[in-house]
């Protein structure tokens, strides 16, 4: 039987509805369900991302004879790598927040311009940063705590990693736009692909090919290449509401992307400063006899903290497109609900990790080393670092929510307060006590800044969100 025009129209409409249902409707779907759908995949993606970074360190720490020194060298590289990654966050979060607001307002034309400009900016940044870091890496490593013993290992790892900057920045920065278009599962798959490749290749290059720490770096670069290819192919697919394109960067859009992304960029970049300060302080006050031991233990502790802070960033970062979308759609009630459910999710996660940190930190530490001195120091460091991780939930949720609402000035000020307090405590405590006292800088900064962020956010919450919900007009 031939299909009538009306039947064909109805069938087309039904197919359109089914296609729409494959994505998440940020403006109509249940808020708690949306938070789970967007934040949990992003959280898992961040967790997987951290795991394959930690796997590098685990394999490196277990290299025969040179494992401890290689691990200290990788620890020295960590803040520099974080600094490189922060530029992907600058464009990724800045562009995706602006992109989500335009989608919420139904402005697909300008959303496409924002996506294209973000892609172009990442291409330019990756080229510039590769050149700059290759030219300055020797000085950076010396300034950031590399000793005569650990410098060769750190230099080898950083040189290879820097050559893969293009893949690292593209995969990280453009992945935000997959989630912003309602595909958090694909965003998680991006990271999963990189993790699987890295975990499989690490032992091959490190032990089978006897490349040692160079093998860990090569495996990481290949993994990032795989993630990058997947991200770019995904954004070019027809199922994407806004497909990927490239343009010459437009000054006005570039300015807005940098303005919105500067706060999360600086938050991540100052994490590097903190780790650099920690390594330098531990090396200075620990001396030649104890400095490298302290840095090795600190590297293990910081790896453990990444298992907490990175998933939290995933939870809050995954919810940002949802907040920004409803901001653009002028739905303050949905914004309030989103913030509440994201905070609840973060508190549940940090509470579990707090208990794990108290009960079984030895299990994590033993993966890195069998040396009793390193194990004892690292277990103690984990328990100190995690003293205030539950209050830290408030800091992460409220600061990232302010960023999603376009209030980058306030979010940046709150973040810088925490980092400044952390930095000051890291430098002052060892002067008053011993080198180990630097570990207490983390809980001091976490506790004080969480109280301040809560007070500031609820002032903003009462003043703006209970009213019209319009904090500022984000324009292209």
Image (tube, rainbow, N blue to C red):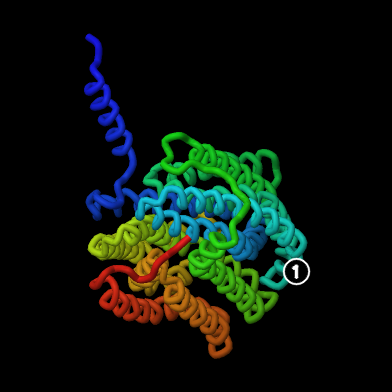
* Image quarter of the N terminus: top left
Residue at 66% x, 62% y: name it: 73
Q: Nearer the viewer, residue 87 or 408?
A: 408
- Secondary structure under tag 1 reads helix
Q: Left of 108 or right of it: where is 165?
A: right
Residue at 58% x, 75% y: name it: 278
Could you say where residue 22 lies in the image, as x and y percent from the top left? Answer: 32, 37
Could you say where residue 342 lies in the image, as x and y percent from the top left? Answer: 30, 61
Q: Nearer the viewer, residue 472 or 120?
A: 472
Q: Left of 87 or right of it: where is 175?
A: left
**Is residue 344 at all visible to an observer of this figure?**
no
Q: 280 above or below 254? A: below
For the residue carrying disc 1, how many other residues have a C-alpha within 10 Å: few (<14), some (14-19), or many (20+)? few
Could you say where residue 472 lies in the image, as x and y percent from the top left? Answer: 38, 70
Q: 211 above or below 461? A: above
Q: Left of 236 or right of it: where is 150?
A: right
Q: Nearer the viewer, residue 452 or 292?
A: 452
Residue at 38% x, 72% y: name it: 395
Q: Which residue is mark 1?
A: 139
């Amino acid at each position: 039987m031939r299909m009538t025009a009306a039947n064909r129209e109805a069938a087309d409409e039904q197919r359109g509805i089914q296609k729409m249902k494959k994505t998440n409707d940020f403006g109509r779907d249940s808020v708690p369900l949306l938070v789970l759908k967007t934040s949990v995949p992003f959280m898992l993606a961040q967790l997987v991302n951290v795991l394959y970074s930690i796997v590098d360190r685990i394999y490196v720490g277990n290299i025969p004879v040179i494992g401890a020194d290689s691990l200290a060298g990788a620890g020295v590289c960590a803040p520099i790598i974080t600094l490189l990654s922060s530029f992907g966050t600058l464009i990724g979060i800045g562009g995706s927040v602006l992109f989500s607001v335009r989608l919420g307002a139904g402005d697909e034309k300008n959303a496409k311009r924002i996506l294209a400009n973000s892609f172009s900016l990442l291409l330019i940044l990756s080229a510039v940063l590769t050149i700059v870091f290759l030219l300055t890496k020797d000085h950076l490593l010396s300034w950031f705590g590399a000793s005569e013993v650990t410098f060769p290992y750190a230099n080898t790892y950083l040189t290879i990693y820097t050559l893969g900057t293009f893949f690292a920045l593209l995969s990280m920065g453009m992945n935000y736009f997959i989630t912003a278009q309602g595909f958090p599962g694909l965003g998680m798959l991006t990271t999963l692909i990189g993790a699987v490749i890295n975990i499989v290749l690490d032992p091959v290059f490190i032990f089978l090919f006897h490349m040692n720490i160079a093998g860990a770096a090569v495996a990481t670069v290949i993994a990032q290449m795989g993630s990058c290819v997947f991200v770019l192919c995904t954004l070019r697919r027809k199922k994407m509401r806004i497909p990927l394109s490239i343009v010459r960067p437009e000054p006005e859009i570039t300015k807005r992307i940098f303005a919105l992304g500067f706060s999360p960029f600086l938050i991540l970049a100052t994490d590097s400063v903190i780790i650099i300060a920690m390594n330098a302080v531990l090396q200075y006050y620990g001396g030649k006899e104890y400095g490298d031991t302290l840095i090795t233990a600190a590297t293990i502790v910081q790896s453990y903290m990444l298992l907490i802070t990175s998933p939290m960033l995933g939870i809050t970062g995954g919810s940002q497109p949802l907040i920004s979308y409803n901001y653009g759609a002028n739905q303050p009630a949905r914004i309030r609900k989103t913030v509440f459910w994201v905070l609840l999710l973060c508190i549940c996660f940090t509470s579990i990790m707090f208990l794990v940190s108290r009960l079984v930190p030895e299990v994590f530490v033993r993966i890195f080393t069998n040396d009793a001195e390193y194990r004892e120091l690292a277990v103690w460091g984990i328990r100190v670092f995690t003293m205030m991780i539950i209050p830290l939930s408030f800091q992460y949720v409220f600061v990232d929510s302010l960023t999603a609402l376009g209030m980058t000035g306030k979010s940046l000020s709150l973040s810088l307060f925490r980092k400044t307090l952390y930095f000051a405590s890291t430098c002052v405590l060892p002067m008053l006590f011993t080198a180990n006292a630097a570990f207490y800088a983390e809980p001091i900064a976490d506790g004080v800044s969480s109280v301040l962020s809560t007070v500031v956010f609820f002032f903003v919450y009462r003043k703006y969100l209970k009213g019209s919900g319009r904090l500022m007009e984000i324009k292209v």
